[in-house]
Amino acid sequence: MALALMTDLLREAEQHNKAVGAFNVADMEMIIGAIKAAETANTPIILQIAQARLVYSPFHLIAPMMVSAARAAKVAVAVHLDHGQTLDVIHSALDYGFTSVMIDGSALPLEQNIAITNDTLAAAKKYGAGVEAELGTIGGSEGGAEKKAITTNPETVKEFLRQAPADALAVAIGNAHGHYKGTPQLDFEALKTIHALTPAPLVLHGGTGISDEDFRRCIDCGIRKINIATANFDAFADGIRAYCARHDTPGFFGLHEAAVQGVYENVLRHIAVFNNEEKS
Ligand code: 13P
């Protein structure tokens, strides 16, 4: 297949009432595992990396690898910058060939969030790339300081998207990055209200730890992109840990295969839920 546009994948997801899995990756093993799962399931995915994680995965190394893997995949794969914080990194992602970028202006006052989202839209337009924005504040941490959650105010959604017409909108509805402290309590009423206010595809961050049933409810309420990061990192580490427990002198190639397999199984499991096939 080919490097795909996030906007095309989200449109197709909307038509079939499903969500596209957006899987955070940090190295070659994670990329290989995620794409192998997408190919096994014959389902498009989004490969993404958050700006805060570039300290571990230098952009000039990881970005070409993500784009190249997407180009070579047997299914459509979009490549996305997750939680872009600065316009210089947004520009770099677009130059590397990412087909969409997120600008996270959620910590800014509304007017500044609108302004930086519009700057990002202008930059992305030159590349035909899509833009994800965020309104409200998602709790937990995605590689930075813990954030205090602020539920997306449905009343501001329409005005925000009128002034900054992003291609996708990340919402805060009780979801949080990292491991949940207790059972996630998602605000489905808020999600339904937001969905009724806008045709924009909605994005669920903090996918790790959400139950399959809640994922399906979110999809039925307009979520079209679901982010999975922590579960992918855990699957990588668990795969290696299990391999080490079975081998007295673990070698590189066995560790490599264990990491790929761990990520593969995690991505495959999530894709099966996000395809929402029982209901379609
Ligand atoms: P988790 O780490 O909770 O899966 O969240 C992923 C995410 O939303 C990335 O932006």
Image: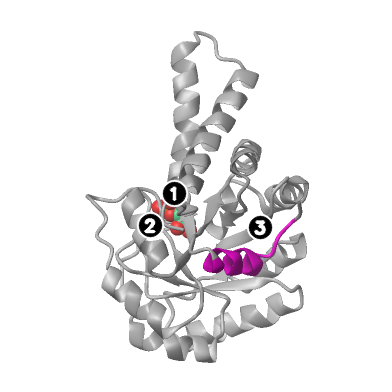
Q: Is residue 189 visible?
A: yes
Horizontal relation, residue 177 to residue 130: left or right: left
Residue of label 1: 273
Look at the picture and state if 189 lies above or below 269: below
Q: Position of residue 252 (x, y in %)?
A: 63, 20
Q: Position of residue 152 (x, y in %)?
A: 35, 76
The three-letter amino acid code for the residue at tag 2 is Arg
**Foreground label between 3 and 1:** 1
Look at the picture and state if 11 lies above or below 52: below
Q: Is residue 84 visible?
A: no
Residue under the point 60% across and 61% down: 81
Mark 1 / mark 2, whichever is N-terminal: 2
Task: State the CA–CA distance, disc 3 to disc 2.
Answer: 24 Å
Task: State the CA–CA distance, disc 1 to disc 2.
Answer: 7 Å
Pick whichever, 37 or 146, lies toward us: 37
Residue of label 2: 216
Horizontal relation, residue 210 to residue 26: left or right: left
Mark 3 beta carbon near ligand 1 (under 8 Å) = no
Mark 3 / mark 2, whichever is N-terminal: 3
Residue under the point 29% across and 64% down: 174
Q: Secondary structure at mark 2?
A: helix
Image: magenta residue range: 3-15
Does the CB distance between marks 1 and 2 fall below 8 Å? yes
Mark 3 / mark 1, whichever is N-terminal: 3
Residue of label 3: 79
The three-letter amino acid code for the residue at tag 1 is Val
Q: Position of residue 92 (x, y in %)?
A: 71, 64
By secondary structure, the bulk of the magenta-drawn segment is best described as helix
The three-letter amino acid code for the residue at tag 3 is Val
Pick whichever, 275 or 52, lies toward us: 275
Please give the count of numbered marks on the rendered protein: 3
**Ligand 1: image quarter:** bottom left
